[in-house]
Image: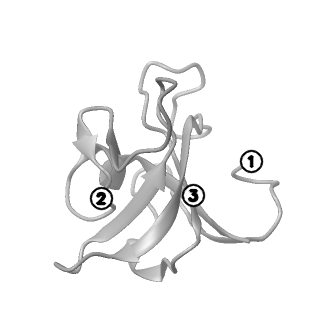
Amino acid sequence: MAEHSPGVRVDGTDGTNPPAAAQLHPGDLVLFNADSGDDGDDAASPTVDHVGMHLGTDSEGRRRFLSSRKSVNGPTMADLSGVSLLDGTGVYARTLHTVRRV
């Protein structure tokens, strides 16, 4: 999905750093390598294991997204012990892998 889904690849990880969140537009797909226990977790080919949709910035200027959950109770603004923020040092800010615009 990160490489071949419809739309345009806006930015992606270089294997060390996440894509630049400043390039995000509301509606962009944000793909993550959030589970470090997945197979294929190396800098050359990390596994994309979580996807969400960028919603834009909140009232404090932080970039927010909506995503699925591992449990069956629907979409959420938080999961994996972290809030759904693409700024800072939280799990999603650190593990953002690819941004796609459809």
Residue closer to the observer: 85 or 74 = 74
Label 2 element class:
loop
- Circle 2 sits on which residue? 85
Alpha-carbon neighbours of circle 1 within 10 Å: few (<14), some, or many (≥20)? few
Label 3 element class:
strand
- Circle 1 sits on which residue? 1
Horizontal and vertical percent for residue 2? 69, 51
Please tell me in which quadrant of the rendered image residue 76 appears.
Answer: top left
- Circle 3 sits on which residue? 98
Comparing labels 2 and 1, the label whose residue is closer to the camera: 2
User: In this orientation, does residue 79 appear?
Assistant: yes
Q: Relative to 52, is 85 on the left or the right?
A: left
For the point 20% across and 53% down, which residue is it?
A: 89
Amino acid identity at mark 1: Met
Label 1 element class:
loop
For the point 32% across and 53% down, which residue is it?
A: 84
Amino acid identity at mark 3: Thr
